[in-house]
Structure formats: C-alpha cells, structure tokens
Image: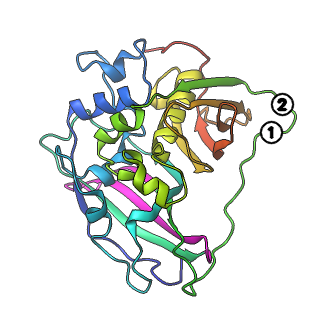
C-alpha cells in the first residue's frame, strides 16, 4: 500500500442502531414474509441482515436526516486534491463477515475505523478512492466485519496520481446455465424508501444531480442493488440464514433507474472448503438492459433453494 493518500486513517466514527433500523433495512432490500427473523422483532431468532453494516458509515449515530454533501466533504485526504462529493458514485464493494451483529447497539459502543487503501487517477473520467472500513466493538476491540470498496469521483481526474492496478476478474463459468435466478422489481419510490437507512445522497431523490452527472435524472443507490442481490443469494442458496454467507462482493457496472426490474443469475462453483463454504459467482442485470452488478462473488454454504430454513 503506497502512493498519495494511502494509509491515511480517518478519525474513528461512532455508530449505533436500533431494532427499528434493522427492521427498516430488511424491508427496503426485499426480505419477505417467510423471513420473519429479519422482519419481526419478537421472532425467537430475530437477526440483523448480514450486510446491514454497509450502511453505518453513512448513518453514524443519527436518527434524523443528515446533510450528505456536508458529511462526505468533512475530512479531506492529505496529499491528494479535494474532491467534490456532489459528483461521486460507488465503484465496487466487498464485505467479510466475522461475527453476527447484535440486533441493537443500545448499551454498547461501536465504531467504524476507516483507512485509505489507495487513490488512483483515471484521467478525464475521474478518480478512484479505495478504502477499508472495519466495524469494531470500541470497548473490547472485537471486529464484526470488514468492508473494502471504491468511490469514483466523476470527472475529477488528471491530477497526476498513480493509475492503480486492475482488479481481479470473477466471471461466471462459461457455457453453464445459472443454478438459481433471483428477481427484484423496483418502483418509483424504492430509492426514496432505501435512503431512510441513512444514505441521503440527493442523487437518489431529485433529478438535478443525476442530470449534471449525465444520468438523465435520479438513479437508484448502487448499494440498493448490491444489498438486494445479497438478499437474493442468501434466500436462494443459504436458506436465509446469515451463518451461511462469509463474503460478498460486486462491482457497480451501470446505473439502475426507479421502476427497473433486477434479475440476478447465480452460479455455484462447487469448490467447498472443509467448513462447507463454496464460491458463488453472480451477475445482476436490469431486465432488457445492461448488467448493473458485475464481478459478483460470494462465499456461501449452500443449503438449497426456496423458503427460509429457520
């Protein structure tokens, strides 16, 4: 890890959540009535959907709406230009799960520790900032998950920084039909509901930012598609049990618009380790349009297709 900005650590950020927050999240990503352990707080196995921590760097400890642009620009990275957070989109995200999250943080202290892994100048198209975010119990140092990802600052390149190396490619197996297919229908309000989790980027609510960035109007959160796809994999292959997914990642390939229908094709590679986790590849497309999530890869215990097993 070297180059401008690499290794810079942001101040640790306190985060918190309530049962109501995790219920809302599960509802916004498509959890269904046969998955009450994500949707009903009195269920005997009530759990947090495993990708919920991805929202905490946006939410912090807030229960009220926040100024997305102001918060995003709060801490500049030393050694690189100051980027405009009004013109940023997700590049890719990966999350590794270490421990199940408690259903509420009440009475405990959690924080997200964020470090810059690299800042890469892609020329005229823009700049990529790669970060690592670790969710930690601040009182005992126990790590719950680790997320790595990249933010793409549109049209903000050409400052002379390193270009960076190409990422590994995780394509589906050639010539094999998908082992499972998951569909998710969005509507005109999907992004407006999802933003209540704490990601209040105006790009997903009002048309002006999207028009300025060349999208034609408001688009869905990249992490909406990412999270709904994670739900699809867990529901289809993992019996809706968070214990059956260890890693999940995907690259954001193209925008999704409100009302689009998402179709995820899923392939098992059958290379299970001694703990029963095998590699799964996937691609999510907008029906009749482009791939929106590429480079999809997860490590899962496959227990079959269909309803939740809890």
User: Where does residue 46 sit, x and y in percent of width and height?
Assistant: 30, 22
Total numbered labels placed on residues in the image: 2
Q: Looking at the image, which residue sits at the far right?
A: 175
146 is higher (above) or lower (below) than 39: below
**Is residue 42 left or right of 204 when viewed as pictured?**
left
154 is higher (above) or lower (below) than 61: below
Residue depicted at 60% across the width and 40% down the height: 298
Q: Which of 257 and 307 is in front in this view?
A: 257
**Is residue 133 left or right of 235 when viewed as pictured?**
left
31 is higher (above) or lower (below) than 150: above
Q: In which quarter of the image is the N terminus?
A: bottom right
Q: Are marks 2 and 1 in contact (CB under 8 Å)?
A: yes
Q: Looking at the image, which residue sits at the far left?
A: 107
Q: In which quarter of the image is the C terminus?
A: top left
Q: Which of 212 and 61 is in front in this view?
A: 212
Write the start and end of the magenta stretch as one range: 122-147
Please say whether residue 160 is visible from this viewpoint. Answer: yes
Q: What element carries label 2?
A: loop
Would you identify the image quadrant in which residue 166 lies?
Answer: bottom right
User: Where does residue 216 sit, x and y in percent of width and height?
Assistant: 53, 50
What's the mark number on residue 173?
1
User: Where does residue 301 sit, x and y in percent of width and height?
Assistant: 58, 29
Crowd band around label 2 with a 10 angstrom C-alpha radius: few (<14), some (14–19), many (20+): few
Crowd band around label 1 with a 10 angstrom C-alpha radius: few (<14), some (14–19), many (20+): few
Q: Mark 2 points at which residue?
A: 176
User: Where does residue 129 sit, x and y in percent of width and height?
Assistant: 49, 69
Residue depicted at 68% across the width and 35% down the height: 272
């Amino acid at each position: 890890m070297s180059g401008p900005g690499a290794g810079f650590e942001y101040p640790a950020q306190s985060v918190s959540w309530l049962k109501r927050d995790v219920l809302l999240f599960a509802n916004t990503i498509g959890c269904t009535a046969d998955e009450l352990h994500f949707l009903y707080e009195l269920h005997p196995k009530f759990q947090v959907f495993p990708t919920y921590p991805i929202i905490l760097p946006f939410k912090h400890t807030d229960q009220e709406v926040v100024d997305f642009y102001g918060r995003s620009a709060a801490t500049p990275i030393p050694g690189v230009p100051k980027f405009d957070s009004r013109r940023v989109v997700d590049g890719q995200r990966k999350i590794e799960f270490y421990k199940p999250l408690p259903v509420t943080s009440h009475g405990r202290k959690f924080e997200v520790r964020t470090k810059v892994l690299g800042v890469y100048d892609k020329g005229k198209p823009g700049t990529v900032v790669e970060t690592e975010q670790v969710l930690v119990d601040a009182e005992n140092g126990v790590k719950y998950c680790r997320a790595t990802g990249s933010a793409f600052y549109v049209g903000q390149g050409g400052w002379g920084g390193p270009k960076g190396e190409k990422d590994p490619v995780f394509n589906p197996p050639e010539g094999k039909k998908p082992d499972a297919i998951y569909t998710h229908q969005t509507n005109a309000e999907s992004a407006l509901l999802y933003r209540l989790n704490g990601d209040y980027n105006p790009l997903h609510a009002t048309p002006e930012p999207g028009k300025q960035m060349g999208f034609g109007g408001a688009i869905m959160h990249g992490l909406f598609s990412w999270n709904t796809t994670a739900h699809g994999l867990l529901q289809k292959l993992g019996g809706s049990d968070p214990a059956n997914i260890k890693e999940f990642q995907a690259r954001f390939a193209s925008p999704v618009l409100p009302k689009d229908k998402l179709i995820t094709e899923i392939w098992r590679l059958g290379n299970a380790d001694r703990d029963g986790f095998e590699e799964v590849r996937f691609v999510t497309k907008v029906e009749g349009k482009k791939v929106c999530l590429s480079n999809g890869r997860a490590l899962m215990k496959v227990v079959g297709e269909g309803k939740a097993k809890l």
